[in-house]
Image: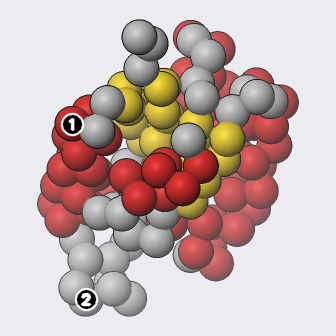
Amino acid sequence: MTKTQVLVIGLEPTLVDFSSMPDMNAGKVRAGLEADQAKLAALGYEAELCLTDLGETAADVVARKLSEKAFDCVVIGAGIRTLPAYFLLFEQLINVVHRAAPGARICFNTRPSDTAEAVQRWS
């Protein structure tokens, strides 16, 4: 049986300014992403992280990753989607995913630790 292939796209946590989010930091985000990657594996999914810069090469990085294999589900993280500074990056990445993986389900997490729930909603 083939595992559902999941790509989780997010910002490289060490590049994010957490000054407006006192309860968050790069270590917590990284730990949440890795924990949810392990949770997805335990649920029978094969999940890969694709962490990008703040926009300079992000679209190219995501397009290259999507060209490596067919992904059944693509998660775009809350850091890209909810922070106003990254609105244009979010829009750009949606279009990259739409073009490069037209058959993939797209889902969104609300924090680094609920990625598995987002994937389960759409796979």
74 on left or right of 91: left
Label 1: element kind? helix
Q: Residues within 10 Å of mark 1 (few under 14, many from 20)?
A: few
Query: Who's the residue at 37% across and 52% down the image?
Result: 116
Q: What residue type is labelled 2?
A: Pro
- Report whether residue 60 is seen: no
Give percent across and percent down for residue 106: 66, 47
118 on left or right of 114: right
Give percent across and percent down for residue 41: 26, 33
Query: Who's the residue at 59% across and 49% down the image?
Result: 122
Q: Mark 1 points at which residue?
A: 42
Q: Name the residue under label 2.
A: 22
Where, by quadrant of the figure, is residue 3 drawn?
Answer: top left
Give percent across and percent down for residue 77: 50, 57
71 on left or right of 79: right
Q: Up-down: is 121 above or below 101? A: below
Query: Who's the residue at 75% across and 61% down the image?
Result: 88
Q: Up-down: is 96 above or below 118? A: above
Label 2: element kind? loop
Where, by quadrant of the figure, is residue 19 drawn?
Answer: bottom left
Could you tell me how far apart the alpha carbons at marks 2 and 1 are, in whole angstroms? 31 Å
Q: Quadrant of the N terminus?
A: top left
36 on left or right of 6: left
- Report whether residue 81 is seen: yes
